[in-house]
Amino acid sequence: MSDAGSGSQELVLPSEYETLERVDEILLGCSRFNALDEKTQNEVALAMIEAVTNAVVHGNRLDKSKQVTVTCDWDPDEIRISVHDEGEGFDESCVWDPTDAEHCMKCSGRGVFIMRATMDDVEFEMSKETGTTVRMRKRTSGAGGGSGGEG
């Protein structure tokens, strides 16, 4: 890990529910995250929790032989989070809008929506052979923290 100005941290996690409790480890170890205002911290944490949950539960289907790799990179201007699973991916066009009245009372299906609502950029890279990676980026307002994004 580098100084508070820039750095990187990576965790390789098993695909089990207990993994979700460890997501805070990577965020708390990210010195840039700790310098952000509370609103931005909450947005980044929520997006990361959703991404890891999707990787463990939907991507790797709780298969303990598969792993999830979480990487957090930061510099004074932004935090970049990457979550990679070993699953087959999904069809983005089939992700429904949880704000639609037909779907609003369903118990799942909000993860991608939440990631996109809280982060500035969210991209998916999917391969049936190598797995799925979600890359998220949150702009910050420099050394003093603060949310630089619209959300």
Image (cartoon, helix red, strand yellow):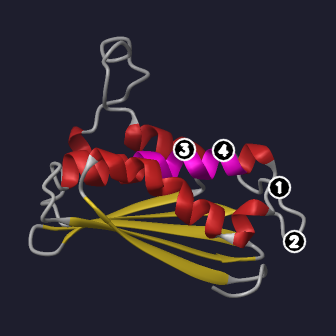
Tag 2–tag 3 contact (CB < 8 Å):
no
Tag 3–tag 1 contact (CB < 8 Å):
no
Tag 4–tag 3 contact (CB < 8 Å):
yes
- Quarter holding residue 123: bottom left
Can residue 151 be spotted in the picture?
no
Q: Residue at x 54, y 65 (%)?
A: 26
Mark 4–mark 1 Cα distance, whole angstroms, equals: 11 Å
Disc 3, SS: helix
Among all residues in the image, which is located at the extreme left?
129
Residue 42 circle label: 4
Residue 112 circle label: none
Q: Which residue is mark 2?
A: 143
Q: Which residue is mark 1?
A: 146
Quarter of the figure with the C terminus = top right
Mark 4–mark 3 Cα distance, whole angstroms, equals: 6 Å
* Dot 1 crowding, Cα within 10 Å, few <14, some 14–19, many 20+: some
Q: From the viewer's perspective, is residue 74 above or below residue 21?
A: below
